[in-house]
Image: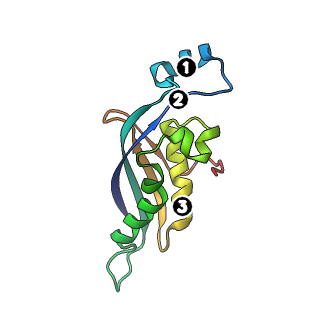
Amino acid sequence: MIYLTRRVEFSAAHTLYNPDMSPEENEQCFGKCGNPKGHGHNYVLEITVKGEIDKKTGFFINVDTLKQIIRAEVVDVLDHRFINVEIDYFKKNVPTCENMAMWVWSRLESKLENCSLHRVRLYETRNNYVEYYGDAGEEIR
């Protein structure tokens, strides 16, 4: 088994606000990140796939193919968007880095051929990131 990681960047805005909680609960839970007008991040996304090398081609997925899938399924959807407002899933789910990583997984998992998704790593800031290995057992749609 060999692993390949592709790194991409995108910029997006969100607010960490749960409409099912009171304004006081939101303030206590999310602090300044709960500003209803939102705030932005320059996200860095790392997608790691794994597979067995094809003897004929020398790889298990063409990097350009992986790049195109990530761009179509994630970057073009999120880049320069207000996530809470423009992405249906996040109209009902708080767009934390954790939830976003699971959402990314759900977008990519079925699009890969001859390999499988191993890890989604999403940096919200250069000091904070989450990793998801597809093990939450939750259907994201």
**Which numbered dot is residue 109?**
3
Q: Please say if 32 is above or below 73.
A: above
Q: Please say if 65 is above or below 34.
A: below
Q: Nearer the viewer, residue 95 or 118?
A: 95
Horizontal arrangement in the rendering, residue 137 relative to residue 86 (left or right): right
Horizontal arrangement in the rendering, residue 136 relative to residue 35 (left or right): right
Residue behind mark 1: 29
**Which numbered dot is residue 99?**
none
In front: label 2 or label 3:
2
Residue at point 39%, 71% (across, down): 65
What type is the residue that disc 2 sits on? Leu
Residue at point 57%, 49% (across, down): 135
Residue behind mark 2: 16
In front: label 3 or label 1:
1
Q: Secondary structure at mark 2?
A: loop
The CA span between labels 3 and 1 is: 31 Å
What type is the residue that disc 1 sits on? Cys
**Residue 23 % position (x, y):** 61, 16
Q: Secondary structure at mark 1?
A: helix
Is there CB contact under 8 Å for labels 1 and 2?
A: yes
